[in-house]
Image: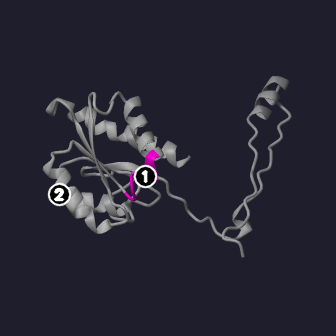
Amino acid sequence: MKRREFITLIGGAAAWPLAARAQQSAMPLVGYVFAGSPEESTHLTAAFRKGLTESGYVEGANVAIEYRWTNSRNDQLPVFFADLIRHRVTVIVTPNLIGAALEAKAATSSIPIVFGGGFDPVQAGLVASLNRPGGNITGVSFMSVELGAHPGHFRPSQPVARTDLPPEATATARSFTTNVLKVPHWPPR
């Protein structure tokens, strides 16, 4: 999944708490905290807005967004979250920075937090478990696991031949054939 699609997904996920709390205010307010500068991530912010729009929320029409950019100054995160809490945001979105999600968790236990990134939220101490995150935090995590450098961990898939199937079933079974891609060892030796 590309980064832009990921941010679009985060935008959609951010809409869930908005729908749940929509009756509390005329226009929900999203606190959006992003690592880097607005110029560096214009396309990602556009993807976030697209995700909200696809969920029925249009910035300026029925949702407002308070943006905060770290500009590589993560020491400003506590100030950002205190300010967003003072503004009474409906939800806090931290799409690309685990430190921001952890700071948001430390700052509030009542405002919903939507995180995203390529990290293990359980190992980071962000959520209790993947299937039941608990508290006020939810999100999307793209985790990868190193499978090991030993080719013996994998068996080539062998088709199973059956002679008792009618020709129609055999043709259908062949249509479900999966190709196996050979991936070189990473990192290169």
Question: According to the image, what is the colour scheme of the structure?
Answer: one colour
Q: Which mark identifies residue 132?
A: none
Q: Residue at x 25, y 57 (%)?
A: 104
Quadrant of the drawing holding the C terminus: bottom right
Q: Residue furthest front?
A: 39
Q: Of the residues shown, which amino acid type is indicated by label 1?
A: Glu
Q: Which residue is mark 1?
A: 39
Q: Nearer the viewer, residue 162 or 153?
A: 153
Judge from the rendering whether residue 67 lies leftward or rightward of residue 3; answer left or right: left
Q: Of the residues shown, which amino acid type is indicated by label 2?
A: Ala
- Residue 56 falls in image quadrant: top left
Q: Which residue is mark 2?
A: 82
Is 36 a magenta residue? yes
- Residue 100 falls in image quadrant: bottom left
Q: Earlier in the sequence, mark 2 or mark 1?
A: 1
Q: Is residue 75 above or below residue 175?
A: below
Q: Position of residue 25 (x, y in %)?
A: 15, 33
